[in-house]
Image (spheres, helix red, strand yellow):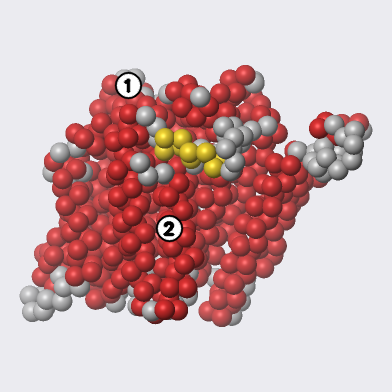
Amino acid sequence: MSFVYQNIYYIGSIGLILIGLYVVLVKRNLIKVIIGLSFLDTGINLLLISVGYVRHGTAPIFSRPGLSPGQMVDPVPQALVLTAIVIGVAVLALALSLAVRLYEHYGTLDLRKIRGLRW
Amino acid sequence: MVSPALLVAVPLGLAFALPLLRLAWREVDRYVPPVGMAFNLVVSLSLLPVVLKNPVVVWIGGNFPPPFCINLVAGPVGVLLSAVIALVGLLVAIYAIGYIREGDTGRYHTLYLLLLTGATGAVLTGDIFNLFVFFEILCISSYALVAYLGDRNGVEAAVKYLVQGSVGTGMVLVGIALLYGQFGTLNMADIAGRVNSVSPASVFVPLVLLVAGFGVEAAIFPLNAWLPDAHSSAPSSISAILSGIAIKVGVYAMARVIFTMFGASELFPSLMVVGLLTLFVGEMSAFAQGDIKRMLAYSSIGQIGLIAFALGLGTLHGLSGGMFQVVSHALSKSLLFLAVGYMIYRTGSMEISSLEGMGRRMPLTSLAFVVGAFSLVGFPPFVGFPSKFMIVKAAVENGGLSTVLVAVALVGTVIEGAYFLKVVQVMYFKGGRELKREEAPATALVPIFVLVLMVLVLGVYPRPMVEVLDSAASELLDRLKYVQWVMR
């Protein structure tokens, strides 16, 4: 159990990534696929955060006396996650607007019925 | 000397200034990308002789030395590729002045500049996360550009491209997270210096994730399902950029990860085999196509396979052959897409059979198409010949298995010759004689013939190019030197 306890953040975030991949691969509704992509993004962001996390750590600011760098979390992954969130938002917004366009053309979001091009 | 950072900053700034400039004069949008790309071309070419002697490393973000800052590494590889990107980008931008008439043209030109910013940044950066960010800029703007016309096929292709592309870049980000967890650094040179200090098993997963993630954009065989749809449904000027530039950036990122960062020589044989598979899948599918743009798109997959094969040789000559193939394919394939763009515009159909009589109807454009096609197949006076010759020579030098594999690869080239000659035959030897001439406009003919000229000049006189390529290949192969440049 101690393995699970110590690595709970990694297990959780990788689980979320795998759920996202499953949804993208298996679901036939485009909106669900986009939700899967969003899961994938969230899982990756959590993975990045947990890479830099220090148990019981605080923000990397010398806010009170006697705070040593060992008690702080790594700020770099948080900066990366901010960037990754912005990118994720851009991709999701584009995906949803394409979904609207696709619905206008085909009248459905079922990927099995959308096959104007040969897959 | 001009700072390489301007190569990224100027197109990015112009992309966001473009909507503002449009407030002053509505027609300005189509003239902004050529200006930005002309600037990039001049800067890249002026940097090239400098970086051949001594690479330029720029620190961004405080004046901390690497690995604490974000850095741009303007080595031979980066500057060569940024020059190619700027050249093809400039010519396609000139073509687009007359070609892009429909829709909100301001949006097209902004996205176009962003795409080229992403490509230039990705080849110049020395920071793995920055590579990811530039790569995403490239990908997101190409998803949007594929759907630019908003028609049925374009939107569907863009959705497929978007889903596969974002899963791919997601894998890249997971790989980066694992690498950061292991080494605590994002600088590629720093990672390259430390990879040997840990057990190979612990860097295997990030290596695979990075190669697979970049492989989606590079359209390596099992990951290439999006390419034929996206490249054939986009407007022709965008197809030219996607085939000429975007997939090459994917190949560059893969090469950078495999050679410079990890020095993963165990991966070379599998890279060769995957390259051959990609080559055959691409060429066979291209042979079966009746749609000219899909045929060209599948042929791009085949060429990427050949490049991957050359990189997989893992020798100096193999790498410079592969890089030469990158350049020659960028020139010839964008030439083909640009030429085909106006043929489709005139006939209103993408079927190969509808190109009958083109040799008389649009003689200059058809001539350019023939030059591009012959160059891709590898006929002598064109640039495809020296590049393919270098790959074959490198493979034979390597001896053993690679000699056999290159013989198989040449069969792929024969298939390529077969379908390109079929198209040439339809264009020149079929169809009635009573067709009147309706040539493409000058804004299209000028870039097309500049490309024809480049294809011819580099084909006849490849020597200066080969010198640049050799030092580019040694930058990719010589990890120690790369680490020393950056870390100093």
Residue B375 drawn above or below residue B350: above
Q: How many marks?
A: 2
Task: Name the residue type under label 2.
Answer: Pro
Nearer to the camera, A10 or B423: A10
| Residue that sits furthest to the left in the current view | B433
Residue B398 badge: 1
Find residue B192 and report its horizontal and vertical position in percent: 55, 27
Q: Is residue B111 visible?
A: no
Residue B11 badge: 2
Same chain for the residues under marks 2 and 1 in the image: yes
Nearer to the camera, B460 or B81: B81
Residue B141 drawn above or below residue B476: below
Find residue B11 and report its horizontal and vertical position in percent: 43, 58
Q: Earlier in the sequence, mark 2 or mark 1?
A: 2
Residue A70 drawn above or below residue B459: above
Q: CA distance from mark 2 to mark 1?
A: 42 Å
Give the image quarter of residue B392: top left
Q: Is residue B227 left or right of residue A69?
A: left
User: Quarter of the image containing the N terminus of chain B?
Assistant: top left
Q: Is residue B294 left or right of residue B9?
A: left
Which chain hosts label 1? Answer: B
Q: Secondary structure at mark 1?
A: helix
Nearer to the camera, A84 or B365: A84
Residue sitting at x 7%, y 75%: B433
Find residue B150 and report its horizontal and vertical position in percent: 47, 75
Task: Name the residue type under label 1.
Answer: Asn
Which chain hosts label 2? Answer: B
